[in-house]
Image (cartoon, helix red, strand yellow):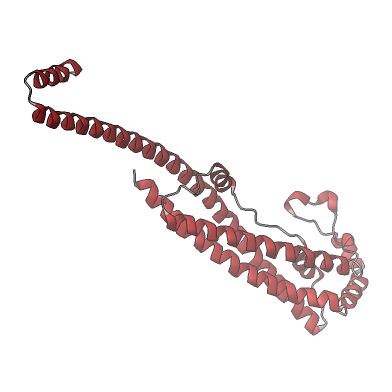
Amino acid sequence: MLRFFRSIRQRLLTENKFSKYLLYALGEIALVMIGILLALQVNNWNEERKQRQVEIKYFGNLKNDLQADITRLDYMIEVAHKKVDASRNVKRKTDRDSTGSLYNFSNDLLLLFFVDEFRPNDNTYNEMKSSGNFSTLRNDELKLKLMNLRKSYIEIEALQEHMRYDFNVFLEDFEKYVDWGRYFILPKSNVPKLEFAYDSIYIESHIDGMEKEIRELFKSKVFLNNIFLLEINYTYDIDLLQKTKTQIHEIIEILELEQRIK
């Protein structure tokens, strides 16, 4: 091919057809430039295709992480509802100065004492940020929603830290009044699953003393204020977790749409 063009160029020069040679030369330059542009375009297309494959991989991993977060959030919302109910039950007893059933009271306190927290599955997000792939995402709406979700996760963590402090104060005050260890038989309990076996024989034979302990507890302003705060905090927690779930569902919808675009 090069020999063919060279022969044409030589023939035009020998025939003294300078104007035709000039047009030919310009055409040859144009062909070279078109070839370079086509090569660059193909290279850009290949790079975009590779980047898209990286995006699709990240989208799948993100979706898996977010679906796991939804499962965890559903559990945390259920637990928070139970804690709100438990705090209201205890508050009703304090209002009436009534211990009620020691077993029911103990069940409510068990719900309030044991704290579980939400931890997001953020490995994929962190990998995207550290590798620089997050900034190259073409879907600006997706990027914005992911950043807003991170803000919600930070807000959840801040609330959990606040509640952790309140819980420590609550537990410390409770232990001043009630010897809770006498309620249970630990060798018969499944502690990892928080399933405790009551020492019914001891409770029934010491019921008067235990009820007296609880009535003394009801006089503690620290305890009463903490029961009040527990209801408020977990009610707010439910609202925050629900909003976060909505954010995640919106992101998953975008991810699924993106995965369908090849």
Residue 247, position as x, y percentages in the image: 50, 61
187 displayed left or right of 74: right
Query: Which residue is nearer to you in this view: 196 or 32?
Result: 32
Q: Residue at x 45, y 49 (%)?
A: 137
Q: Residue furthest bottom?
A: 96
Residue 16, quarter of picture:
top left
225 displayed left or right of 132: right
Q: Residue at x 15, y 20 (%)?
A: 5
Locate the N terminus and report the quarter of the image it occupies.
top left
Compared to 50, does 109 lie above or below?
below
Q: Residue furthest front?
A: 16
Residue 6, quarter of picture:
top left
Q: Residue at x 7, y 25 (%)?
A: 17
Residue 159, position as x, y percentages in the image: 69, 65
Number of on-image labels: 0
Query: Which residue is nearer to you in this view: 33 or 192?
Result: 33
247 displayed left or right of 18: right
Residue 252, position as x, y percentages in the image: 46, 54
Compared to 26, does 228 lie above or below?
below
Query: Which residue is nearer to you in this view: 72 or 98?
Result: 72
Q: Is residue 245 visible?
A: yes
Locate the C terminus and report the quarter of the image it occupies.
top left
Residue 122, position as x, y percentages in the image: 59, 49
Compared to 93, does 136 lie above or below?
above
Q: Is residue 100 visible?
A: no
